[in-house]
Amino acid sequence: MVQSLNTKVDLTIKATSYLGLATYGKVMVGDKAFEFYNEKNIRDYIQIPWEEVSCVMASVMFKGKWIPRFAIKTKQNGNFTFSTRDNKALLRAVNKYIPSQNMVRSLSFFQVVGRGLKSIFIRKKKK
């Protein structure tokens, strides 16, 4: 069995991890770390200490009414994408340990397409 990093747990909720194939389990937000544990395989877990988190990116749709998923960007190991039953409540719990300036909205589909088109036209002008 895996030893938890947290001494106090603020929130436990059912979640999905999108690291490779989707895996189902539970997310624990505590005083020391963000932890994901798989329901079926106890050796499949993700523990991210708060010191390793550089920012939390959330996909926000319909002016904040719906948040389908969020990603945690770490300083060394890259991005980890998750979705929970109540992403707003989880992000509020995470905000206790991560400063608000490190919690950002990810780009929408149209912003990504717009930036791609702008970069194409800028490259053509430079030639």
Image (cartoon, rainbow, N blue to C red):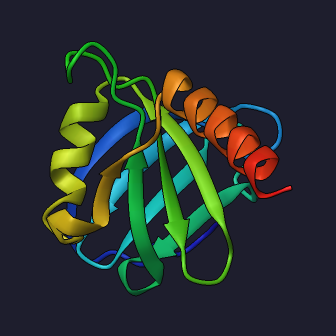
Q: Position of residue 74 (x, y in %)?
A: 54, 73
Depicted 20 relative to depicted 87: above or below: below
For the point 62% across and 60% down, the residue is 79
**Which x, y percent locates residue 10?**
18, 56
Residue 39 visible to an observer of this rendering:
no
Residue 16 position, x and y percent, is 57, 33
Point out the image quarter for the N terminus: bottom right
The image shows residue 40, relative to residue 34, as above or below, that is above
What residue appears at the point 15 percent right and 47 percent down from the top-left corner? 92
Q: Is residue 66 above or below residue 40?
A: above
Q: Residue at x 31, y 32 (%)?
A: 87
- How many labels, in total? 0
Quadrant (top left, top right, bottom left, bottom right) of the C terminus? bottom right
Q: Name the spot of residue 121 as percent of width and height, x first.
A: 71, 39
Q: Camera-side residue: 116 or 70?
A: 116
Spot the residue most to the right: 127
Q: Quadrant of residue 44?
A: bottom right
Q: Is residue 55 left or right of residue 114?
A: left
Residue 78 seen from this side = yes
Question: Which quarter of the figure has residue 39?
Answer: top right
In the image shown, does 47 or 67 lie closer to the viewer? 67
- Residue 117 lies left or right of residue 92; in this view the side is right
Q: Is residue 96 left or right of residue 77?
A: left
